[in-house]
Amino acid sequence: MQDKLKSGDGTFEIVQNGETITGTATWGLSPSGLGGTGGSIEGAIVGNTITYKIPSPGFAGEVEVNGDEIKGTLVGPYPYDLVLHREK
């Protein structure tokens, strides 16, 4: 299953294969420039919880899936609250 998830600040495009997810994350450059502009995603899904990492630029996080909404955290140089909506 492939999903495109968007927020006002970025996009996660993920493909689920069993309990594994892969894909790409993109977002605008932060004012500090420390967060880069995204990268490849890899992770696992168990129940409604996705644990993921974006190896370059060194981000990781955990989100909960609730219907078409995903909420959780994105942690890199700073922690960010993350809310994404499935694009239909």
Image (cartoon, rainbow, N blue to C red):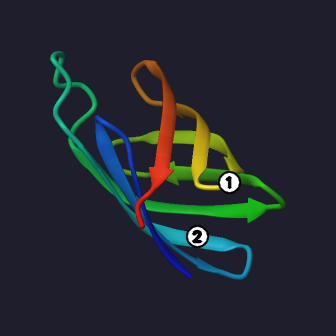
| Residue placed most toward the observer, 62 or 6 | 6
| Residue placed most toward the observer, 16 or 70 | 70
| Residue placed most toward the observer, 12 or 35 | 12
- Circles 1 and 2: CB distance less than 8 Å? yes
Q: Is residue 34 above or below residue 25?
A: above
Q: Residue at x 16, y 25 (%)?
A: 33
Which quadrant is the N terminus positioned in? bottom right
Locate residue 64 relative to residue 22 in the image: left or right.
right
Locate residue 71 relative to residue 66 in the image: left or right.
left
Residue 5 placed where, x, y %?
Answer: 43, 56
Say which element carries label 1: strand
Locate residue 14 relative to residue 16 in the image: left or right.
left
N-term mark: 1 or 2:
2
Q: Estimate the spatial distance between the alpha carbons at disc 1 and disc 2, rounded to whole Å.
A: 8 Å
**Residue 20 sits in quarter:** bottom right
Q: Residue furthest front?
A: 88
Say which element carries label 2: strand
Amino acid under label 2?
Ile
**Residue 24 sits in quarter:** bottom left
Q: Residue at x 42, y 67 (%)?
A: 88
Q: Looking at the rendered structure, which numbered label has been put on residue 19? A: none
- Please name the residue that numbered disc 2 is placed on: 21
Residue 17 placed where, x, y %?
Answer: 63, 83
Locate residue 28 relative to residue 40 in the image: left or right.
left
Q: Residue at x 67, y 51 (%)?
A: 51
Residue 79 placed where, x, y %?
Answer: 49, 21
Amino acid under label 1?
Ile
Q: Looking at the rendered structure, which numbered label has been put on residue 50? A: 1
Residue 76 placed where, x, y %?
Answer: 43, 29
Q: Residues within 10 Å of mark 1 (few under 14, many from 20)?
A: some
Q: Residue at x 15, y 17 (%)?
A: 31
